[in-house]
């Protein structure tokens, strides 16, 4: 395929109809959402959806999220009217970064979308360009994150081009995405007594706190996350794969003291012949700056938002990880993110640990 065009709809409004026509013709097009860029294709077309898997190099047993223009399209893709808990979640968080796993309507979707499961993951993205594209092409779009499989999700059109240039028909440029991490994937499961329980299969842009606030104390909500609940197998099939990874080897360093973390990381650099990357937060940057003078090996220090502002960390995380690749870092040390109080910090740590392939050091 020739080089992929990157279109700015703001500069050239007619590109929106062009992108919609490509999708209707069974091509794949990348577009921004409020979380990360997605790689869209007609969810009803087997041939079109196959192109997503080919472009990404994605394992075929990892199902895709179906994106809708609005709640009114839901019945096109699900088998039955969602229950009261799902209704409450949709009312509160759509459009927005919440994906619901629901029984799939038979025959409505390419079987590749659901990877043969009886359920389908659906969401309504909260981004004007995504919604305009969905409306213009008039059909649900299957769209995983627009990265090569295993790479960090793209938060700019340039990231998409780095991974997928020449492999997709077009990229719509809507600037940097706002949330920066993917949607929260949720499944409501009935207990043996018929009580609905909310399982968070992938932490993301909507936090556990927000879900609890909407549903109240009577509904149980928990994170079925392999790194928090090691006992349970991941139920979002995608969670078992290596993800979000930089090219260098990465270790997440956790301790109760930022000074201790910085000292430990500095000690690792002595005598190292690696090209080193350090991921830190605004408040801690000064703890590393002396290393720029004292260390002989190439070193880059990347600041990823503020320690006190998980949303800023989420927004910058994937770009930060990609910066290490640009620098050519072969060994990366990332400070753990400390705020795990049911907020966005949980999703940040989930992605960091995955980016590190589970390599984590806990300092005593
Ligand atoms: O924010 C997002 O969710 C982005 C944007 C583009 O919308 N999309 C995204 O898609 O992150 P993807 O394919 O990278 O991740 C989809 C996740 C995977 O972990 C997958 O296993 C899970 O959703 N998933 C999809 N269908 C499922 C199903 N039927 N049951 C359980 N998990 C499912
Ligand atoms: Mg992805």
Image: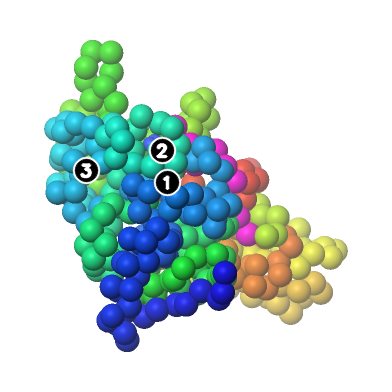
Looking at the rendering, in which quadrant would you find the C terminus? Answer: top right
Query: Residue 111 occupies which quadrant of the picture?
Result: top left
Q: Position of residue 136 (x, y in %)?
A: 23, 65
346 on left or right of 101: right
For the residue pair 353 and 170, the one nearer the viewer reads as 170
Q: Is residue 238 magenta?
A: yes
Looking at the rendering, in which quadrant would you find the N terminus? Answer: bottom right
**Is disc 1 placed on a helix, strand or loop?**
helix
Q: Which residue is mark 1?
A: 46
Q: Which residue is mark 2?
A: 111
- Relative to 307, say whether 47 is above or below: above
Q: Position of residue 81 (x, y in %)?
A: 16, 33
Residue at 43% in and 32% down: 116
- Relative to 190, say whether 267 is above or below: below
Q: How many marks?
A: 3
Tell me if I can see residue 133 in this picture. yes
For the residue pair 291 and 217, the one nearer the viewer reads as 217
Q: Position of residue 13 (x, y in %)?
A: 27, 81
- Relative to 79, say whether 337 is above or below: below
Ligand 1 lies under 8 Å from the Cβ of mark 3: no
Residue span colored magenta: 235-246
Q: Which residue is mark 3?
A: 76
Ligand 1 lies under 8 Å from the Cβ of mark 2: no
Q: CA distance from mark 1 to mark 2?
A: 7 Å
- Magenta stretch prevailing secondary structure: loop
Q: Nearer the viewer, mark 1 or mark 3?
A: 1
């Amino acid at each position: 395929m020739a080089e992929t065009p990157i279109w700015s709809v703001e500069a050239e409004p007619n590109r929106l109809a062009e992108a919609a026509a490509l999708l209707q013709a069974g091509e794949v097009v990348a577009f921004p959402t409020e979380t990360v860029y997605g790689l869209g294709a007609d969810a009803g077309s087997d041939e079109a959806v196959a192109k997503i898997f080919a472009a990404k190099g994605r394992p075929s047993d990892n199902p895709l999220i179906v994106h809708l223009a609005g709640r009114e399209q839901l019945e096109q893709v699900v088998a039955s009217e969602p229950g009261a808990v799902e209704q409450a979640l949709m009312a509160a968080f759509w459009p927005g970064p919440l994906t619901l796993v629901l029984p799939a309507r038979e025959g409505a979707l390419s079987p590749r979308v659901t990877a043969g499961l009886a359920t389908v993951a659906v969401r309504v993205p909260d981004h004007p360009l995504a919604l305009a594209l969905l409306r213009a092409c008039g059909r649900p779009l299957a769209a995983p994150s627009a990265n090569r499989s295993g790479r960090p999700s793209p938060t700019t059109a340039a990231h998409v081009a780095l991974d997928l240039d020449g492999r997709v028909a077009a990229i719509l440029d809507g600037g940097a995405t706002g949330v920066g991490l993917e949607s929260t994937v949720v499944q409501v499961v009935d207990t043996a007594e018929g009580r609905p329980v909310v399982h968070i299969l992938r932490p993301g842009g909507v936090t556990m706190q927000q879900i609890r606030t909407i549903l109240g104390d009577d509904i149980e909500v928990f994170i079925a996350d392999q790194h928090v609940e090691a006992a349970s197998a991941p139920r979002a099939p995608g969670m078992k794969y290596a993800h979000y990874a930089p090219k260098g080897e990465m270790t997440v360093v956790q301790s109760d003291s930022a000074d201790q973390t910085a000292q430990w990381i500095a000690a690792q650099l002595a005598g190292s012949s690696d090209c080193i990357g350090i991921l830190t937060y605004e408040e801690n940057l000064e703890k590393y700056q002396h290393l720029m003078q004292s260390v002989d090996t190439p070193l880059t220090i990347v600041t990823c938002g503020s320690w006190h502002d998980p949303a800023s960390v989420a927004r910058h995380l994937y770009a930060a990880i990609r910066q290490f690749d640009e620098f050519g870092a072969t060994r990366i040390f990332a400070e753990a993110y400390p705020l795990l109080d049911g907020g966005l910090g949980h999703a940040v740590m989930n992605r960091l640990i995955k980016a590190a392939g589970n390599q984590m050091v806990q300092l005593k």
